[in-house]
Amino acid sequence: MYEVALIVSLATFVAIGFYYVRSPSFSIFHPFTIFMAVHGLIFVIRPIVGDILHYDKIYSIYQFNPSIDARTTVIVASNLSLVCFSFWCLRVGAMPMRFNFDRFDREERRRLTQVFSLASMIVLPFAIYSLYTTYSSLSQGSIVTGMVIDRASGYQYNTATNGYVTDGQMMLVPWVALIAWIGRFRPLSLVPLLLFVLVKAGTGGRGAFVVAMVSTALLYCFEHRRRLLPATFIGYGAALLALFALIGLDRGATLRQMLGQQVQVDVEEKLASGDDWKFLESMDWANMEFFEYLVYVIPERSGTYDYFLDNFQIFTDPVPRAFWEGKPKGEPFRSIFLFDYGDPVGMTRSIPGEGWYAFGWIGVIIWSSLWGAAMGDLYRRFALSKQTTMQTACYMAFVPSLIVGYRDGMLQSVVHSAGVYLAPIGVWYLLARGAAVPKADALRKAALRKLRRALAVNPAPTSAIEGASPPAAPASAEPHIPPAVRRRRAFLQSLAGKTAQP
């Protein structure tokens, strides 16, 4: 039964992927492309590999053993999520990618360069300090950073420092990509990106530098009006995956040792790393087991669903714990305590898992459909927009973060990452407004006024040769007029010409 579900899952994924690739909407800029990549890896390929290699490490760590029915339920529910997400995303975002920018947009970006340098003087010191403190504290163990796991809920919260200081380093993710874009991807402009990848890898964090590199690739393709990545980027992608896997072995401990740092790895890092993991078995890819744990607990053991109440966390998270003594740890209205039934440390829910957590099968349909419609609408709005410098910067910073967003599946995770990634772009925008940098629309209007003044001073001649007949209107000037009406008008004009002759 489980093997049949795996075969049906693969067939469903291939069918939807074939339809998408053949549709005009297919491009690397569409959020559905990232969704297919994430879903295909964690819910199609990995379950097949796991069935062949008999994954069992996560079950041992989490202290549960799902039944065949529960495992089959996960495969069916994940495919239901794929169908719902695909239907709404491709329905709402059913249009080809357009490149609407022109030379005036490029001129706007050129004029924004000086303001970008000023914004860097504001953003970079804070972001670099945040990254430095994280990197330094990891050499002595992550407990130095003040991050503590609440064993009742599994939520990791800050006790010693301000969460904004901890997250400030994430502002470097879009910034290093924008530096490459503004620098027209010259070798020197790529240096900040490479340095960020190196240092961030030393902290053991991989999602951030993956998002930064994908964002840079999207900006490169956008600048060159390419819907797909060049073939030469395949090698870069393979190197990125290799680096991702290498850092996952010890969460950057080896790299920190190479740089002369003493290393102490905390409990969660030890669980996520290790040489005894099988191929693709580690917790970085284990959304299948995470979802199985949710099915194992909800609703049979928990007796209830969450009913989407965990989304209220987006209102409590922004408030620093120093200003709110009794701030809830994680979800403000928690009704399900997953740690009462096992030890699901480091678990992420994914989109179908979050839907099941909220309301079972109905929750999977609702949550996946809402995600699909929202991502399709986001893509459609950008494709139809004027694609100004700020619009492009925001879109190319947000869409790559969906790699983590789809894996987490929670609204709080998406809002949190979007806020951090878009914050430096907001600083850039406010400085540009304060400096009164002209927008592309203003530059177009100024160019049009200049052209009109030039024509008023030196109007174009009505004809190149005296007595020459005026040029005929192009056939496409009035494409809405039927051919029969055009022939009738031509006949009447010929009669009028004959009548006018002496």
Image: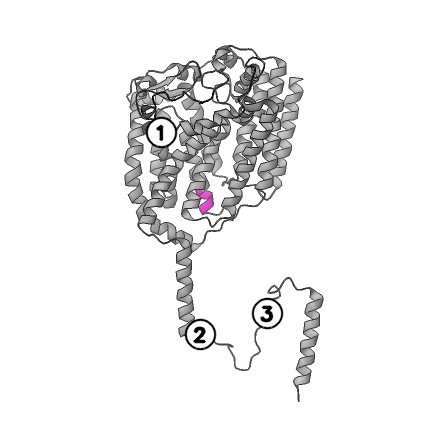
Left or right of 295, for residue 130: left
Answer with the quarter of the image where residue 181 lies: top left
Of badges 3 and 1, nearer the viewer stands 1
Q: For this rendering, which residue is in front, 128 or 81? A: 81
Q: Where is residue 208 in the image (x, y as percent from the top left)?
A: 40, 30
Of badges 2 and 1, nearer the viewer stands 1
Which one is earlier in the sequence, the residue at label 2 or at label 1?
A: 1
- The disc placed on residue 473 is 3
Which one is earlier in the sequence, the residue at label 3 or at label 1?
A: 1
Quarter of the image where the C terminus is located? bottom right
Q: Position of residue 202 (x, y in %)?
A: 35, 25
Left or right of 154, for residue 143: left
Q: Position of residue 152 (x, y in %)?
A: 43, 14
Question: Residue at horizontal 61%, vertical 12%?
Answer: 67
Start-end of magenta stretch = 219-224
Circles 2, 1 touching at the beta carbon (< 8 Å): no
Q: Name the residue under label 1.
A: 167
The kind of residue on which mark 1 rests is Asp
Q: Is mark 2 on a helix, strand or loop?
A: loop
Question: Residue at horizontal 56%, vertical 29%?
Answer: 367
The kind of residue on which mark 3 rests is Ala
- The disc placed on residue 423 is none
Q: Name the residue under label 2.
A: 459
Q: Is mark 3 on a helix, strand or loop?
A: loop
Let me know if residue 223 is in the magenta part: yes
Let me know if residue 79 is in the magenta part: no
- Can you see residue 241? no
By secondary structure, the bulk of the magenta-drawn segment is best described as helix
Query: Alpha-carbon distance for marks 2 and 1?
Result: 60 Å
Which one is earlier in the sequence, the residue at label 2 or at label 3?
A: 2
Q: For this rendering, which residue is in front, 330 or 32? A: 330
